[in-house]
Image: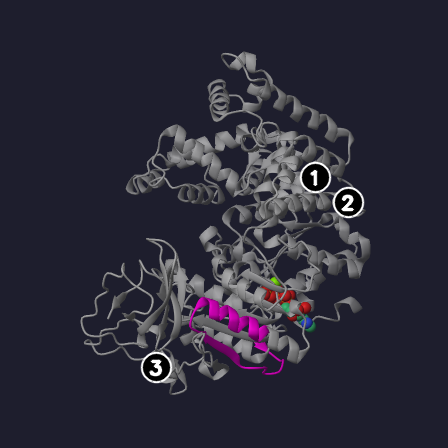
Amino acid sequence: MDYLAGLNPEQQAAVKQIKGPVMIIAGAGSGKTRVITYRVAHLIRSGVDSFNILVLTFTNKASREMRERITHVVGPEAKNIWMGTFHSVFSKILRVEADKIGYPSNFTIYDTDDSKSVIRAILKEMNLDDKLYSVNLILNRISAAKNNLVSWEEYQKNDQIQADDIESRRPLLGAIYQNFVQRCYRAGAMDFDDLLFNTNLLFKRYPDALNKYQHKFKYIMVDEYQDTNFSQYLIVKKLAAVNENICVVGDDAQSIYAFRGANIQNILNFEKDYPDLKIFKLEQNYRSTQNIVNVANSIIANNKEQLKKNVFSEKENGDKIKVMRAFSDNEEGKLVAEEIMHQRTTKGMRWNDFAILYRTNAQSRSMEEALRKMGTPYKIYGGLSFYQRKEIKDLIAYFRLTFNPSDEEALKRVINYPRRGIGDTTIDKIIVAADQHSITPWEVIIAPEKYLEGRVSASVTGFAVMIQSFQVLTKSQSAYEAALYIAQHSGLLKDLYEDKSVEGLNRYENIQELLNGIKEFSEREDIEEKGLDVFMQDIALLTNDDNDKNKDADTVSLMTIHSSKGLEFPQVYVVGLEENLFPSQMALNSRTDLEEERRLFYVAVTRAEQKLSLSYATSRFKFGTLINCEPSRFLDEIDAQYLELDFTAKPVNNTGSLNYDDERSAWSRTDDKFSKPKPKPASAPVKTTSILAKAHVPSAGFKPSDTSNLQVGMEVEHERFGFGKVISLEGNKPDIKATIFFKEIGQKQLLLKFAKLSII
Ligand code: ATP
Ligand code: MG
């Protein structure tokens, strides 16, 4: 069994335990995913039919990588393994079984934008205030209900939920939920949560179907088990009920999706569900240096709720963890970009070896800007992915409508784009008629004389005929030919071509890029089903985390910590370690939330193999205003012996004449421990501990004065930045920006209407 040589004895034992329930709960980097990969290879080598294996991963990327590795050991057999995310695997099953639960097999998968649009339509129809009934809140509530398998009927019957809704002054949530489900059903569409909800429904109502898959999936494995929700838990439990050959791996310390319904209870339940469960422990971390592992351990030790685990590394100590302080978010970007450039040059590394991780997507901007200035190639994962761009969604809406004309959201999107003279009034009429007759808008437009009063515009009929011609075409043409035809004959390509602006050109190129992607897809040899409908189903399942077109390019990776789960990089830069950002402001109210935030920090630091760097800025623009930031409490929690401070950065100063006194650091080092400075005596006028705040003690009774007559050359005093002189003014009232040179911190640009400034 040479192929198992790359495993330690514990890992081997877990791999070889192929019968019965198995659970591995172990720390980051201890080889959990590796065990699953080898286990699958081992099963096949031991004679298990690859068609009988099901592996559930957290991202499509993870499953692609796993399949590649397994192929190395077992060859093309690996192609037959059922492997993917919960959503992709069960949408595949639902396509086969759809008719049982009343859906067409070509059901559309609605993304968040589609769902929001449906909710907006419902709110309008029900005449509800969208401030009280905010779209996001409604979607969260519906999603939570579905993931806990609470149907709209049960939701409406449940006294507790009703009491909660009344308390929150939103008694109509149940009705909205019902309306939402019914509209999606009518449109032949499921959202992401429906894929799991309906799988459960299918298994509950159709024991035969369940039985079929129980016998098909004789061996089941689940990675990242700590982040499964109740709906996923139950699917796995049902499927494994006959053979009980189920192996789950996870790490409670990395559970970071509770906000989306993931339930740590699933790990604890597992022991109860399978009394003869075999538990394996993995304690050695093979990913990171000792310093990194020690830092991770010292972070997670602050959490009260956790299963005790030992994690150690036998790698070298490695560099200490670098903590960088910047004076602004832009400067933080610059520091990180420079450090990456420096590391790459001095250590001969590739751009691929670096990752920048942040708490929120918005933080990518300052990082991007800095990297771009230095000419560093980078790639942002998540954020607005290629497939979320407007022009791409427009063309895909045509595809969706072609395969599923009931798809109301797709229809609304393109019925008058490109413009073909179908006005909003006509569209409203169509929708109202559809509602009245309980049919789809498509049924209205193919027989308008039956449902619409008055003369029907020829454009409506023209549109229907065009879509019907697409339907005929896709039956005989390849995915690429059909896609190209649709792009041309819908008028979309021409519309974009005629827009000669830079953005227009960009959009046109994006469409070309999509068509190229479809061409590649239709020429692939490793898959049999290559129709445009299959291509569409694949991309509907892409999540933000899977946005890896050009995955071979050598680029620095930028992503949120949530998306970095399971990944590893030689060097990792975790940025924005500031109070109210990380931990997030929303997590400060309860221990549970704060602990989830800390687990997120644990996930971030454990992505690093050789070098880890943490940074924070002492000021940052948020919603257009410059705010002071305090270093994150998480920095204080790390054992200082593993850290190395880099406080060399000076505030950016165009004249280069700045003298900054480092002793005034808000975050200074005393007694070998990080500690924030003691609070000032009550009489001190400055409350915040930010470094910028401390740079200036304002004159007694500081009052911003009317700056509407501010002129270049005037001397001013700022509440925090101290004394300075106005260098230039630009913009128009009320958005005048002043560039001011402050004696102490150098040049700054301030939006006058917000600046705490007085003329002296
Ligand atoms: P995470 O909790 O972050 O998902 P994990 O427990 O899944 O981590 P893996 O990603 O499987 O850990 O392994 C971490 C790294 O250690 C990988 O690069 C893997 O190839 C390597 N590794 C794991 N076990 C061994 C081993 N026995 N010998 C050598 N390398 C190993
Ligand atoms: Mg893993």
Ligand 1 within 8 Å of disc 3? The answer is no
Q: Secondary structure at mark 1?
A: helix
For disc 3, the marked residue is 664
Q: CA distance from mark 3 to mark 2?
A: 63 Å
Position of 752 with respect to 421 (left or right) is left
Q: CA distance from mark 1 to mark 3?
A: 61 Å
For disc 1, the marked residue is 534
For disc 2, the marked residue is 527
Q: Earlier in the sequence, mark 1 or mark 3?
A: 1
Q: Quadrant of the N terminus?
A: bottom right
Q: State the residue lying farthest toward the bottom.
A: 671
Instruction: Give the crowd class for mark 2: few <14, some 14-19, many >=20 residues within 10 Å.
Output: few
Query: Percent position (x, y) of residue 501?
Result: 59, 45
User: Can residue 48 be seen in this snapshot?
Assistant: no
Q: Earlier in the sequence, mark 1 or mark 2?
A: 2
Determine contact: label 3, label 2, CB under 8 Å: no
Q: Secondary structure at mark 3?
A: helix
Q: Earlier in the sequence, mark 3 or mark 2?
A: 2
| Magenta-drawn stretch contains 330 | yes
Query: Percent position (x, y) of residue 597?
Result: 44, 63
The answer to whether 234 is drawn above or below residue 375 in the figure is above
Q: Secondary structure at mark 2?
A: loop
Q: Nearer the viewer, residue 291 or 383?
A: 383
Tell me which amino acid carries mark 3.
Arg
The number of numbered badges drawn on the structure is 3
Query: Percent position (x, y) of residue 288?
Result: 60, 74
Magenta region, residue range: 311-340
Tell me which amino acid carries mark 1.
Val
Determine contact: label 1, label 2, CB under 8 Å: yes
Instruction: Give the crowd class for mark 1: few <14, some 14-19, many >=20 residues within 10 Å.
Output: some
Residue drawn where x is 69% and y is 55% of the image: 64
Residue drawn where x is 76% and y is 46% of the image: 520
